[in-house]
Image (cartoon, rainbow, N blue to C red):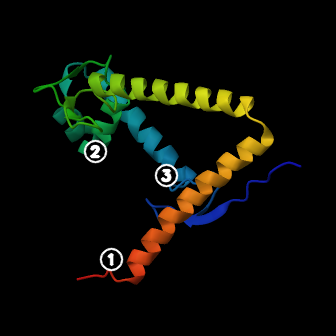
Amino acid sequence: MALINIPKIRNCTKCGKIFAAMHGEKVCKDCVQKEKDFEESVITYIRENPGSSVKDVMHATGASEKMMRRMMQDGIFSNAAVQTEANPTYPCMSCGRPITSGTYCMDCLSRLRDQTKRAAERMQLRIKEDKSMSTIERLDKMAEREFERENRLSGIRRNFSKGMFKDH
């Protein structure tokens, strides 16, 4: 049986127009296309005016600082002839260190890769353990986890009913 993706009716966050969002989109196709066209005009301006500063590009095209920052994060200007007066930077999403491209600084990116690798190794180990268990052992382990979870929740409920989490 094939899954049917039913669209949700939404208002575009940019223009307010009603549209059918198939995959959780928040902006209608027309506004997405306008944004792409606008980005293309910014890139064209940069190609035609090599050596322009970011401020010059913003002034000449009407691009916002937010849009320019996003385009920098996406690496659109990494090979472009944009002159940067003071090497425009923005904060790393994790530590806040100033960066000029991407979302994370190299240290945070390295840390995230290591964490992902360790998580994948733990998952592989858990899968290996599960395969070596019998069905009854797996069910017992699942029941034990659910029992622990329920105990934690009941403790929270008990504290809540005693008034420990009341607004002051």
Q: CA distance from mark 3 to mark 1?
A: 45 Å
Nearest to viewer (mark 3 / mark 2): 2
Residue at mark 1? 165
The Cα–Cα distance between marks 1 and 2, rounded to whole angstroms, is 40 Å
Type of the residue with mark 2: Lys
Image coordinates for residue 128, horizontal then vertical, percent:
67, 27
Image position, residue 26 (x, y; %): 51, 56
Residue mark closest to the camera, 3 vs 1: 1
The quadrant holding residue 121 is top right
Residue 31 disc label: 3
Residue occupying the point 31% across, 19% down: 80
Q: Callout 1, which amino acid?
A: Phe
Residue 95: image tag? none
| Depth check, front residue: 19 or 160 | 160
Asked if labels 2 and 1 touch by Cβ distance under 8 angstroms, the answer is: no
Determine crowd level at label 2: few under 14, some 14-19, many 20+ residues with C-alpha closer than 10 A: few
Closest to the observer, 132 or 94: 132
Q: Position of residue 41 (x, y in %)?
A: 38, 34
Task: Give the mark nearest the N terminus, 3 or 1.
Answer: 3
Question: CA gap, disc 3 to disc 2?
Answer: 17 Å
